[in-house]
Image: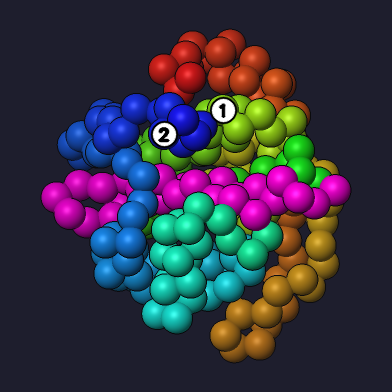
Amino acid sequence: MTASSSRTYPRTVAHADGDIALRLMTGADAPAVLAFAQALPAHDLLFLPRDITEPKVMAAWVRAIERGAIERGDIDSVLAVRDGAVLGCAAVIRDPHSWSGHVAELRVLVSPALRGGGLGQQLAQEGCALAFAHGQEKIVAQMTVDQRGAIAVFQALGFRPEALLTRHVKDREGKAHDLVVLSQDAAQVEAQMRAYGVTEAF
């Protein structure tokens, strides 16, 4: 049994606007995830290595999920869904064959309409729990420095700034932006989450 399959999916989480289902992404979700990504502000996607609003990039993501690995390693993708619409997603990326095989990267995206209501934190917690299940020792996340809400979500889970990558990405207009890298040891994140009483994530 893989770590992701040992998680309970689908699982319903409460939200102010109504219950939301968390479940693993499959190939059948590609059209809904693509629609979700294309509706996001372009600036929200700058921290991603590839533009997931492109159908060919989405197709590669689906192939990665279906074969259980990506070019850099393994991936788990969790979707937040209501009435067939994707409202958010979290991805945990690992490369068990690299020198950083003990490190997982966590990426979280949430629909602008649902921000500030706790969904981002729930997805980040789910991603951390999946990383723990895989035995990862360190988790990293990155975002542009002006994404203060996202930075706050990760800091609440015990992540701290580790690096600033200046002029690291350029938007579609060619403007350069800085990226901040946040990180935390998995054991410390788990302890932080348990301190807040977030035991259902485990």
Question: Label 2, on which residue?
Answer: 5
Question: Which residue ends up furthest to the left in the rendered image?
Answer: 83
Marks 1/2: CA–CA distance: 10 Å
| Residue 91 at least partly seen | no
Q: Position of residue 18 (x, y in %)?
A: 18, 36
Q: Is residue 12 left or right of residue 118?
A: left
Q: What colour scheme has been applied to the protein in the rendered image?
A: rainbow
Q: Main secondary structure of the magenta part?
A: strand
Please, is residue 155 above or below residue 25 in the view?
Answer: above
- The residue shown at (56%, 46%) is 92
- Image quadrant assignment for residue 48: bottom right
What kind of element bears circle 1?
helix
Q: Position of residue 26 (x, y in %)?
A: 33, 55
Q: Position of residue 149 (x, y in %)?
A: 54, 46
Asked if the stretch drawn in magenta spans residue 89, the answer is yes
Pick the front one: 34 or 64 = 64
Pick the front one: 90 or 131 = 131
Whether the residues at callouts 1 and 2 have beta carbons within 8 Å, the answer is no
What kind of element bears circle 2?
loop
| Residue 104 at least partly seen | yes
User: Callout 2: 10 Å neighbours few (<14), some, many (20+)?
Assistant: few
Please, is residue 115 above or below residue 49 in the view?
Answer: above
Give the amino acid type for the residue marked by disc 2 in the picture: Ser
Q: Position of residue 29 (x, y in %)?
A: 29, 60
Q: Earlier in the sequence, mark 1 or mark 2?
A: 2
Question: Label 1, on which residue?
Answer: 133
Q: Which residues are magenta?
A: 73-99
Exactly how many numbered labels are in the figure?
Answer: 2
- Image quadrant assignment for residue 162: top right
- The residue shown at (49%, 47%) is 76
Dot in front, 1 or 2:
2
